[in-house]
Image (cartoon, rainbow, N blue to C red):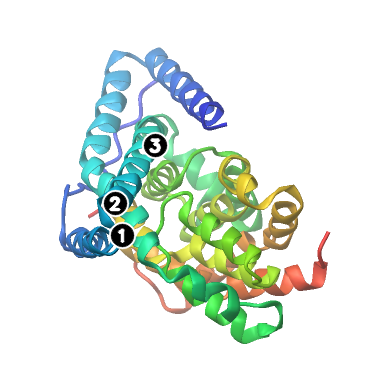
Amino acid sequence: MTLIVDLVLWTLVGALALTAATRGQIVLRAGAREGVIDFIRLLPRIGLGMVGSGFLADVLPQSLIGPWLGPDSGFIGVLLATAAGAMTPGGPVVGFSIGAAALKSGAGAPQVIAYSTAWALYAVHRLVMWEVPLMPPRLVWLRAAVSLPLPFLAAAAAMVLGRP
Amino acid sequence: MSSEPAIPRRKRRAFDWSTAAIGALVVAAAVTVLLRDGREHFLAILTGDLSLFAVMLPKVLAGCLIAAFVTLLLPRETIVRWVGHESGLSGLLIAMLAGFVLPGGPITVYPVAGAFFAAGADAGAVVAFVTSWTLTGATRALVWELPFFGGDFVTWRILAAIPLPLIAGVLARIAVRSFALKLVRDE
């Protein structure tokens, strides 16, 4: 599956590079150089973020998550789940694996949806490590601020829709 | 066809204080794991994370290249017309759709979002784009979420999330207008 993503991404890179080449060597070279320089500048951060997230996740008290976020925990559970999501380190698997584990150990589905929505939208670790270096900081904080209510809306919508 | 003048982009330092703070946290967590669970568990986590890092590297490079070429190739007027300040609801919908189809992780999407913003997209559209990618991104859900939760749960979660990028985009536009936020496009 991750190979398919690589394939799609690099096809996109190829198409863009080809388009750039039709505008001239200079455009092609400038784009490639700019992209590679950005990549090299990002390496230390990404390395730290990736290698660090496993350790951070491992010291999190996962056993506490299930009981606190049960189906009867209601709004408080959604609130706790949202806070927990924001505190969970980034990385592609961490939030999903904790969410799935919580679901298995008795957390309510709307609470898990609030958790993974908050984690996806504004996990503090990801905001600081990845988003701030790549986008203007004020835009990042604006995005995080307007995203604050979204986990609650997602949990509410999930309750209204009902389980499939 | 004339080539567009290059759009100046933020200079990024390789390291700064926020990175250092996270670094300290990571070291503390790693030492805790080492002392609590011993070397074997420590090494298992380290190799797992390093292999994940290796899997991500080509995606990161692709993301940086896509962002660089998009910045060079897409004329500023086109971006402004599609997703600029005057683009209204359709600008937010275009941004949502782009977030849904674009593959890759945060490190692919944030440079592209930053490039669109630098080239004249409005804050609401960028917020809608990032939110839509994060919550409804197709490849992300297929690759990372599906194995953990299964199809029913993921479909249900995504259905509940469909209106959210629009809400976030509208809220961002309202915030920018009512607080007269000055968003710096380049530093």
Circles 1 and 2, Cβ within 8 Å, touching? The answer is yes
Q: Are marks 1 and 2 on the same chain?
A: yes
Label 2 packing within 10 angstroms: few (<14), some (14-19), many (20+)? many
Q: Quadrant of residue A56?
A: bottom left
What's the distance in space between the residues labelled 3 and 2, CA to CA?
21 Å
Looking at the image, residue B158 sits to the left or right of residue A67; the answer is: right
Query: Label 3: which residue?
Result: B56
Circles 3 and 2, Cβ within 8 Å, touching? The answer is no
Which structural element holds mark 2? helix
In percent of width and height, residue A70 lies at: 65, 78
Give the residue type at disc 3: Met
In percent of width and height, residue A62 lies at: 48, 68
Q: Is residue B13 above or below residue B103?
A: below
Q: Is residue B61 above or below residue A44?
A: above
Query: Label 1: which residue?
Result: B37
Instruction: Pick whichever of labels 3 and 1 is earlier in the sequence.
Output: 1
Q: Nearer the viewer, mark 1 or mark 2?
A: 1
Which structural element holds mark 1? helix
Query: Label 2: which residue?
Result: B42
Looking at the image, residue A88 sits to the left or right of residue B7; the answer is: right
Q: Which mark is residue B158?
A: none
Give the residue type at disc 1: Asp
